[in-house]
Amino acid sequence: MSILSPDTLAELEKQSIELPSWAFGNSGTRFKVFGTPGTPRDPYEKIADAAQVNAYTALAPSVALHIPWDLVDSFDDLRKHAEDHGVTLGTVNSNTFQDDDYKFGALTHEDPAIRRKAIDHHLACIDVMDATGSRDLKIWLAEGSNYPGQADLRGRQDRLQESLEKIYARLGDDQRLVLEYKFFEPAFYHTDVPDWGTSYAQVSALGDKAMVCLDTGHHAPGTNIEFIVMQLLRLGKLGSFDFNSRFYADDDLIVGAADPFQLFRILFEVIRGGGLNNPDVAFMLDQCHNVEDKIPGQIRSVLNVQEMTARALLVDRDALTAAQKSGDVLAANAVFMDAFYTDVRPALAQWRESRGLAADPMAAYAASGYQQRIAEERVGGVQAGWGA
Ligand code: LRH
Ligand code: MN
Ligand code: MN
């Protein structure tokens, strides 16, 4: 008898986690970008690699794009390529952080011509979504200021709202806008969308098709992220997750690597709030693999999310509620911790085998020879990476 009940397995079977195309390209820090043999040279190769993650886990059926990093001549063709590899194209991420014109802002800029340029970039992203069949436009803004007095905080907030209104107006009936917040970096004194409250205020003013994106790496140390998850679900405004982990700032490490217990607590609130396998909440990774191989890094990541989801589903909710209602603090905590400390890996391996998947996706990928093959075949050309 598995420790995972049929109901739990049914939930796990429905789970899907979108992969970021940029996780497959080279990345690094401002000190060094290390190249890796076999790194994709274009969006087509990134998608082929992402499809490997799905082939071994059945957890990652879609790939997010970042524009202009993933610009191609024909998005219809890219869509067909994805479908041929058994995946779909997902969220389209805009990029207003690598253009000299945006030094002092994009959607918030003082100059209407620069704002227009940034708005037009987002409209072009929606054109891409029309071709790829993507539902979500994800907006993260690198805008802010470094010194007190440098910028008119209030004016920028007003201009942001006006710019977002123009983008929102272009969305199709089945399309959405998700606004990602981040408390600092690259701006250090103030950021125009620093927290969930600001994102919530901005998207609420737009309408039902605008939601908040929560990136787990975008909070000050010690922030109770699961509380924010609870609140946004309660308000019906949690549109998507960017999963990763961090020790210090926006580290973009493998989700669940730094603090698996935090991931467990977040997923518990997702389940509690009805967010698991809810089409309104998109689960994505937003990570970079600087020193480890990228495909196994992504396989490890989706498995970490699956494992913590399984553990969170194991929480005995009736026993928890009873302990909470009776004020039995230690019993409530024990119910919670019992689930967290349950090793679900053997049960998940067994379940995978019963579905025709490899019991150990990491080992199966390593044994497949794919990594060696791409290292041999992908010679010449320029490896994809941030900005390429
Ligand atoms: C910003 C961010 C955002 C970007 C991605 C590359 O730190 O999290 O989601 O699009 O990194
Ligand atoms: Mn992100
Ligand atoms: Mn980030």
Image (cartoon, rainbow, N blue to C red):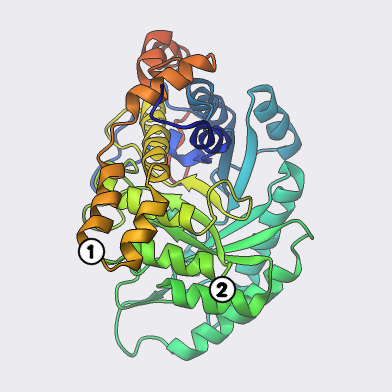
Where is residue 234 shown, x and y percent of the image?
52, 68
Label 1, residues with CA under 10 Å away: few <14, some 14-19, many ≥20: few
Q: Does residue 30 appear in this view?
A: no
Residue located 30% across and 39% down the image = 33
> Who is closer to the viewer here, 290 or 350?
350
Q: Which residue is mark 1?
A: 329
Label 2, residues with CA under 10 Å away: few <14, some 14-19, many ≥20: many
Q: Is residue 255 above or below residue 172?
A: above
Q: Which mark is residue 107?
A: 2
Residue located 63% across and 76% down the image = 163
Residue located 44% across and 62% down the image = 229
Looking at the image, residue 69 sits to the left or right of residue 311; the answer is right
Q: Which mark is residue 200?
A: none
Give the mark nearer the N terminus: 2 vs 1.
2
Residue located 72% across and 57% down the image = 175
The kind of residue on which mark 1 rests is Val
The kind of residue on which mark 2 rests is Leu
**How many marks overall?**
2
> Who is closer to the viewer here, 125 or 212?
212
Query: Of the residues tagged 2 and 1, which is closer to the observer?
Result: 1
Q: Does residue 176 appear in this view?
A: yes
Where is residue 225 shown, x and y percent of the image?
35, 62
Where is residue 98 shown, x and y percent of the image?
46, 57
Q: Is residue 384 above or below residue 260?
A: above
Q: What SS does tag 2 mark?
A: loop
Looking at the image, residue 183 sits to the left or right of residue 31; the answer is right
Q: Is residue 136 above or below residue 28?
A: below
Residue at the far right in the pictured view: 173
Quadrant location, the N terminus: top left
